[in-house]
Image (cartoon, helix red, strand yellow):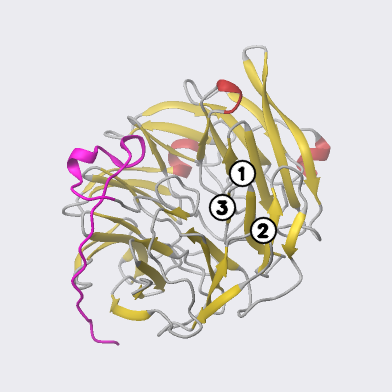
Amino acid sequence: MCRRLTVMLSMVLILPASLAGSAENDPSASAWPQWRGPQRDGRSPATGLSDSWEQKQPSLAWRSEGLGRGYASISIANGRIYTTGDFEDGQAVVAADLNDGRILWRTPITDRPPRIAKQGSRSTPTLDGDRLYVVASSGKIACLRVSTGELMWSKEFQKEWNGRMMSGWGYSESPLVDGDWVLCTPGGDQAMIVALDKMTGEQIWACPAPVLSDRDNAQGRDGAGYSSIVISHGAGVKQYVQVVGRGVMGVRASDGKLLWTYNDVANRTANIPTPLIDGDRVFVSTGYGAGAALLNLVRDGEGVKSEEVYFLSANKFQNHHGGMVLVDGYVYAGHGHNNGFPICLKLDTGEIMWGGEQRGPGRGSAAVAFADDKLIFRYQSGEVALIAATPEEYRLLGVLTPAHQEDNSWAHPVILGERLYLREQDQLMCYDLGAK
């Protein structure tokens, strides 16, 4: 057990109202209120970061413990950190103080640690004013009060909607808060995606699972995938885009009507990465030999349809897990099943600008984030690489070996202000990335 160190951090947090409550409730200038950041795209607004780690690596500001077992990332608002973890008495939501890493409260949302493959939590809490929303890996959405950890309401996916996963690693979704609703993916035939009143948990609408051809079904599986919902306004229609067992789907936000589906990126094991949204376009990729595709959304009468712009085979581009980021028209990610080979792809054409064959400084898949014209690659084996976000060439700017590593380092990195946060099972490390 490590001793807890303290650090004085001053942070200002502004939460987009549609994503994380009113800015009036949050006295700061930026926040990381949910999975993959303010816009769910893996991009941090941080600036003033060091351009190289080759001469001087980031310094460890503090290190704390008490998060439980899990692979969930973290959310941050109002000087607090939130995540999920497994403990002897169940899977719990945990709140910690940014100033000294003290655990402020811990609330179990299951009565025992869920029995799944690779045991541990998955869901990153979504913050919204004085409430947060999380999905237990056993299949349960819960709403808690952020100040105290009080459980406000919860719904069981299987009991309410006959929910199921496409395979046995447990629910991994981070719920989406949009206005007065919270969205999640039970994976039921009649309720693949549901919209709930965020204050009460009452159902607003439920979208059935896509009905696909025999060929399409052969390329995927029934049930929810491991991705999280994102918002698109493609073809002028607000919609929720999600990757499920049967592929990627778009659901009209106003009433839950299924608008379109695309199955060619589905695999029969685990569809994981969160899609990228770019205007009318959706870029999606999965591993296990599937590949990637760029879709264009166009009007189809009163609805919307997806048109394939291009499809990339798995040997050219596949993101197993770890996610992708889109910067100035280029997609950066780790390529390869169970690999995080750095790669840069031109979104418009699917042309590989560089990478895809070189392993990099770590092993296994890589979780990717972007800030200040640089990429953070966190490898499954623990190493963290700083890479220039440029289509010109692969440029490694340094490697950090974290103070603690165990199991698989799958939790996505978080960059807020000049700080890098790395969750590693029960521990959390905070590094200073500032140029000074």
Kindly report the distance in space between the C-alpha atoms of the residues bearing marks 3 and 2: 29 Å
Our reading of the magenta stretch's main secondary structure is loop
Nearest the viewer among 77 and 3 is 77
Amino acid type, callout 3 = Tyr
Q: Position of residue 160 (x, y in %)?
A: 43, 37
Would residue 37 be found to the left or right of residue 350 on screen?
Answer: left
Q: Position of residue 173 (x, y in %)?
A: 48, 50
Q: Which mark is residue 226?
A: 3
Would residue 126 be found to the left or right of residue 354 on screen?
Answer: left
Q: Range of the magenta residues?
A: 1-29
Q: Which mark is residue 391?
A: 2
Q: Are marks 3 and 1 in contact (CB under 8 Å)?
A: no
Query: Which residue is located at x 46 percent, y 60 percent?
Result: 372
Query: Which residue is located at x 27 percent, y 46 percent?
Result: 14
In the rendered image, residue 109 lying in the magenta stretch gets the answer: no
Nearest the viewer among 380 and 387 is 387
